Image (tube, grey):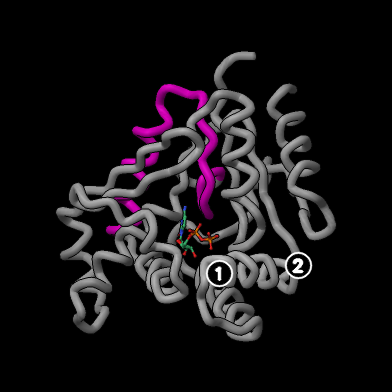
Amino acid sequence: MNKKIVAVDGPAGAGKSTVSKIVAQKLGYTYIDTGAMYRAVAYKVLRQGKPVTEQLITDIVRDIDIDLQYVDGVTKVFVDGEEITGEIRTPEVSSIASKVATIGFVREKLTELQRKMATRGGVIMDGRDIATHVLPNADVKIFLTASIEERARRRYDELKAKGYDINLDEVAKEIALRDKQDTEREIAPLIKAEDAVLLDTTNKTIDEVVDDILNLCRK
Ligand code: CDP
């Protein structure tokens, strides 16, 4: 099977990163988590401890150095040489990530980086605008989704397991707000590409979704 470019888009909690990592391992591909890049920008913005304005975000992204290293099935995230992998999954970072993602300058800079990362093929990239904007010529395009209740429950379980003191309602609200911000923004909003295959994962196991994607890659 030749080295393909696989694009996976969808809302928070649909399971994109979980299944993309497994598919990458099975195919010997590199997994590129573009959300981690928006999160890295958000993390650096938050660390300034200043009011989060468009000006501050633009200044930060102008000379930020983001690096993703995918080693043994784990994506390590570095900002300006410092590893921040464990710091970027908090609800606070999620919410600011969705805000920085509305800014054109941020998207242009990250899109350029993402395209460079995919040039050699043999990659599975997940995000919100991969099939529609970043890699419109991807060989396989998947739009992963699930009901909001199921997505909130998955994210709640994930955060609980990491020791966060949160409740399901708060998580559901945060996800609903991010869905709104991501689908309604003007630049590269979250939308299914016309030629993407829709996979609803609400009642599917991880293995079933992985098999569906592997079958699409084999075509
Ligand atoms: O893991 P989860 O689905 O919760 O989020 P993520 O993929 O880490 O992305 C965090 C935020 O970055 C999203 O809510 C989007 O606002 C933004 N994002 C984006 O705009 N475009 C992408 N290609 C990836 C993420």
Secondary structure beneath dot 1 equals helix
Does 109 lie within the magenta span? yes
Please give the residue where the numbered disc 2 appears in the rendered image. Answer: 147
Image: 162 above or below 106: below
Magenta residues, start to end: 105-131
The answer to whether mark 2 is within 8 Å of ligand 1 is no
Q: Quadrant of the C terminus?
A: top right
Give amino acid for label 1: Leu
Which residue is depicted at the point 41% across and 76% down? 92
Please give the residue where the numbered disc 1 appears in the rendered image. Answer: 159
Q: Is residue 132 left or right of residue 186?
A: right
Which residue is depicted at the point 42% across and 22% down? 120
Q: Earlier in the sequence, mark 2 or mark 1?
A: 2
x and y percentages locating residue 205 in the rendered image: 79, 50
Give amino acid for label 2: Ser
Does 28 lie within the magenta span? no
Of 162 and 20, the residue lying toward us: 162
x and y percentages locating residue 102 in the rendered image: 39, 67
